Image (cartoon, helix red, strand yellow):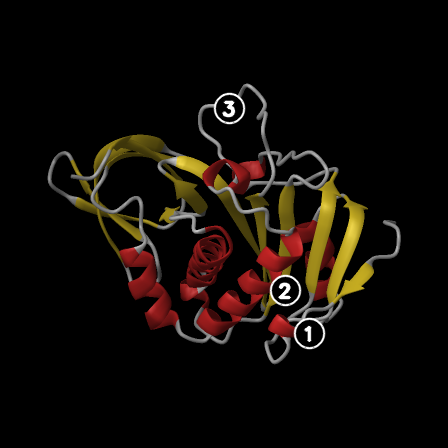
């Protein structure tokens, strides 16, 4: 069991659905903790934050490793009031909240790389992971805040807030704004869809889509009402992608 957390509060989060916010020094995974809490019946709004994770996860079972204090590692427990097929919009809402938070705190111009990354000039600033259990959805985020030397395997593809802005902003400030901005979007799926289209770093790009049963290339065209990606394949057929890895091959015009 992890050591008892600090209960973190901030006036900017008052009046939102979020709280309590449990802040841990070290935990295996904030997503894992909230999934367990969800199965025990915890209410929507519970938040887990960690300075360090020993078993952080990304999509497709990939590990998420960050030095202690280098990233904002946070997960929220949601019980979405929308059809399950639109739950991906909650992930997009979390990404848009991150875009807004880094713009407000650091003047950073970021965008969304479908399906679950926040990028600055094609370098990954944050990753998101959504996991469902019953009627609950846990959305986790790792936002790179203060990194100077990335591991060799991500050195050419990652970035951090301190590399994009000269403003020194505490993780708690970004957390407060992220929660506030996320709360404002969760009950407005149409707003999320429009904003995600506007802030997309993927639409208009030539992409390679990597699925469990194969790979294809095409041009990213649009987002569906559920937040899925429509790609026009090289043979002219449109294919809707609900899950998979997307690699940007060419910048938009």
Residue plotted at (62% across, 36% down): 64
Residue 235 lies, with reference to residue 77, above or below; the image says above
Alpha-carbon distance for marks 1 and 2? 8 Å
Most distant residue in the bottom direction: 15
Q: Earlier in the sequence, mark 3 or mark 1?
A: 1
User: In this orientation, does residue 225 appear?
Assistant: no
Query: Could you say which disc has been placed on residue 43 in the image?
Result: 1
- Of helix, strand and loop, which one carries label 2? strand
Question: Distance of mark 2 from mark 3, alpha carbons?
Answer: 31 Å
Residue 155: which disc? 3
Q: Give residue 46's position: percent from left, percent from top.
A: 69, 67
The quadrant in which residue 8 appears is bottom right
Circle 3 packing at 10 Å, graded few (<14), some (14-19), many (20+), is few
Q: Are marks 1 and 2 in contact (CB under 8 Å)?
A: yes
Towards the viewer: 63 or 148: 148
Disc 3, SS = loop
Disc number lying in front (3 or 1): 3
Residue bearing mark 2 = 77
């Amino acid at each position: 069991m992890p050591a008892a957390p600090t209960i973190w509060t901030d006036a900017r989060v008052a009046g939102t659905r979020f709280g309590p916010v449990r802040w841990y020094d070290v935990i295996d995974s904030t997503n894992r903790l909230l999934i367990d809490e969800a199965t025990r019946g915890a209410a929507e709004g519970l938040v887990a934050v960690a300075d360090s994770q020993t078993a952080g996860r990304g999509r497709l079972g990939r590990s998420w490793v960050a030095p202690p204090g280098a990233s904002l590692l946070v997960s929220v427990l949601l019980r979405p009031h929308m059809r399950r097929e639109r739950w991906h919009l909650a992930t997009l809402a979390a990404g848009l909240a991150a875009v807004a938070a880094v713009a407000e705190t650091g003047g950073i111009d970021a965008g969304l790389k479908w399906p679950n990354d926040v990028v600055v000039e094609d370098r990954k600033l944050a990753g998101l992971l959504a996991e469902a259990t019953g009627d609950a959805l846990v959305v986790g985020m790792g936002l790179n805040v203060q990194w100077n030397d990335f591991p060799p395997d991500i050195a050419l593809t990652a970035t951090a807030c301190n590399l994009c802005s000269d403003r020194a902003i505490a993780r708690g400030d970004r957390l407060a704004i992220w929660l506030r901005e996320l709360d404002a979007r969760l009950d407005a799926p149409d707003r999320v869809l429009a904003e995600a289209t506007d802030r997309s770093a993927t639409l208009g790009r030539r992409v390679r889509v990597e699925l469990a049963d194969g790979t294809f290339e095409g041009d990213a065209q649009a987002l569906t009402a559920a937040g899925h990606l429509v790609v026009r394949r090289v043979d002219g057929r449109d294919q809707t992608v609900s899950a998979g890895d997307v690699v940007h091959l060419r910048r938009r015009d």
